[in-house]
Image (cartoon, helix red, strand yellow):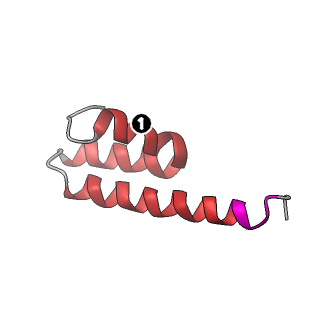
Amino acid sequence: MFGLGRGGSILGLIILILDIWAIVDILKSGMDTVKKILWILVVVVFPVVGLILYVLLGRGKSAL
């Protein structure tokens, strides 16, 4: 539709899978509920940037 072809679909699927992984990881983490909700919102609203931020700043830490 936008000239991305099959590569765009595969990239979108990969991003979706990684975002789902991040959300599950957030839910399983020991963070308090407010931080979990904020991280999930960041990942959902900004799928690529949110995922990168979560991996760099939030995973295994009490960031945000």
Q: Is residue 2 above or below residue 40?
A: below
Type of the residue with mark 1? Leu
The number of numbered badges drawn on the structure is: 1
Q: Is residue 45 inside the magenta stretch?
A: no
Q: Is residue 12 visible?
A: yes
Q: Viewer-proximal residue, 20 or 11?
A: 11
Q: Which residues are magenta?
A: 4-8
Taking the spot 41% from the left edge, 62% from the top edge, the residue there is: 20
Residue designated by label 1? 53
Taking the spot 68% from the left edge, 65% from the top edge, the residue there is: 9
Taking the spot 28% from the left edge, 48% from the top edge, the residue there is: 36
Q: Is residue 46 above or below residue 21?
A: above
Percent position (x, y) of residue 32?
A: 17, 45
Decide: few, some or many residues near mark 1? Use Cα within 10 Å; few <14, some 14-19, many ≥20: some
Percent position (x, y) of residue 54?
A: 37, 41
Percent position (x, y) of residue 47?
A: 52, 49
The answer to which quarter of the image holds residue 19 is bottom left
**Secondary structure of the residue carrying numbered label 1:** helix
State the quadrant of the C terminus: top left
| Image-based side of 24 in relation to 11, left or right | left
The secondary structure that most of the magenta stretch takes on is helix
Q: Is residue 46 visible?
A: no
| Image-based side of 34 in relation to 7, left or right | left
State the quadrant of the N terminus: bottom right
The answer to which quarter of the image holds residue 56 is top left
Taking the spot 71% from the left edge, 60% from the top edge, the residue there is: 8
Percent position (x, y) of residue 18?
A: 44, 57
